[in-house]
Amino acid sequence: MNVGHYPPPKRRGMTVHSIILLVLTVIAAIGFFNLSSSEVGPRFLIWLLVALASFAPIPFFAYRIYSLWRADYHIDRDSLAISWGLRVEDIPLSDIEWMRSADDLVTPLALPSLPFPGGLLGIRRHPELGVVEFLASDAKKLLLIATAKRVFVISPENPAGLSQTFARATEMGSLQPVEAKSVYPSFVVTQAWESGLARYLWLTALFLNIGLFIWASLIIPSTPLVAIGQQFAGGTLDTVPSSQLIIFPVASFLLAVVGWIAGLYFYRWDRERVLAFIIWGSSTLTSLLFLLAVLFIITTPV
């Protein structure tokens, strides 16, 4: 019996998402660069909006790339395991009512929102099937997995091979009973939130970053120049427009977001949770250091 992995098609999705991520990163970098050299005024606000608008989707597309890279469908005589990023669904074969191609439906499936190649993800309702959850990458290879809870839509590179393996595994019977398991990304966040230390670190980092943004926003209009740069013997620090201070809250926020996501990744496993707290603690400390850096800059005589 050919048990094993039947991964979804990945090349096209990885290419499309990587291009989108690269374009957003370049636009954000250009926005922040021009922001740092702009005087306070309409041009400053325009570059600020461009930088923030292009940066905001970057974590979303970065996670989709990671999810597609790790995506897999694994079947054996006991269960079908669907892995898509932080989303995991382990279905005992005895819970699967039927498996068939989406092409066999009388009423076609409506694709989920943002149906980018390599990322058909989300929940829809179908008039015949009820609740349908997409964990797929290719609309041309959709395979339906019906359970009592809902219908899952996957897209293995070889749908016929997975269907045949399922039929043979059902005939041979299970080797040992397994329990159904559902893991959602939100479960990890909720589980971590129940930890008092995690809540303290998250909220501290959040308030530090909010405070840093507000503080920089108040300083920039009222202080034309600030001292940032190298100081040579007997000289003074170079002065630059105060608008460059916006780099500090932006950099602090970016690092805080990256640290938060990285911590959630390691928090999923009990043995790695200490590392998650170290990452969250480091992110909080970094935000505090950025705030102290701004304090040092504005108190340095120009």
Image (tube, rainbow, N blue to C red):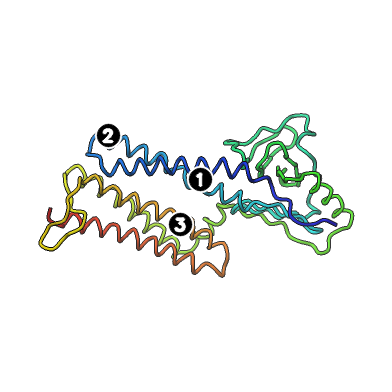
Please name the amino acid that badge 3 sits on.
Trp
Q: Nearer the viewer, residue 74 or 234?
A: 234
Query: In the figure, 141 relative to 247: above or below?
Result: above
Return the mark for residue 140.
none
Q: Residue at x 65, y 34 (%)?
A: 111
Q: Secondary structure at mark 1?
A: helix
Q: Nearer the viewer, residue 117 or 84?
A: 117
Return the mark for residue 60.
1
CA gap between label 2 and label 3 equals: 32 Å
Q: Which quadrant is home to the N terminus?
A: bottom right
Please name the amino acid that badge 2 sits on.
Arg
Q: What x and y, as percent, mark residue 9?
A: 68, 45
- Left/right placement of residue 21 relative to residue 118 reads left
Residue located beneath label 2 in the image: 43
Q: Residue at x 83, y 51 (%)?
A: 165
Please name the amino acid that badge 1 sits on.
Phe
N-terminal label among 2 and 3: 2
In the rendered structure, are the residues bearing label 2 and label 3 in contact, judged by CB atoms less than 8 Å apart? no
Q: Secondary structure at mark 2?
A: helix
CA gap between label 1 and label 2 equals: 28 Å
Quarter location, residue 173? bottom right
- Left/right placement of residue 81 relative to residue 186 reads right
Q: Residue at x 43, y 53 (%)?
A: 257
N-terminal label among 1 and 2: 2
Residue located beneath label 3 in the image: 260
Quarter location, residue 217? top left
In the rendered structure, are the residues bearing label 1 and label 3 in contact, judged by CB atoms less than 8 Å apart? no
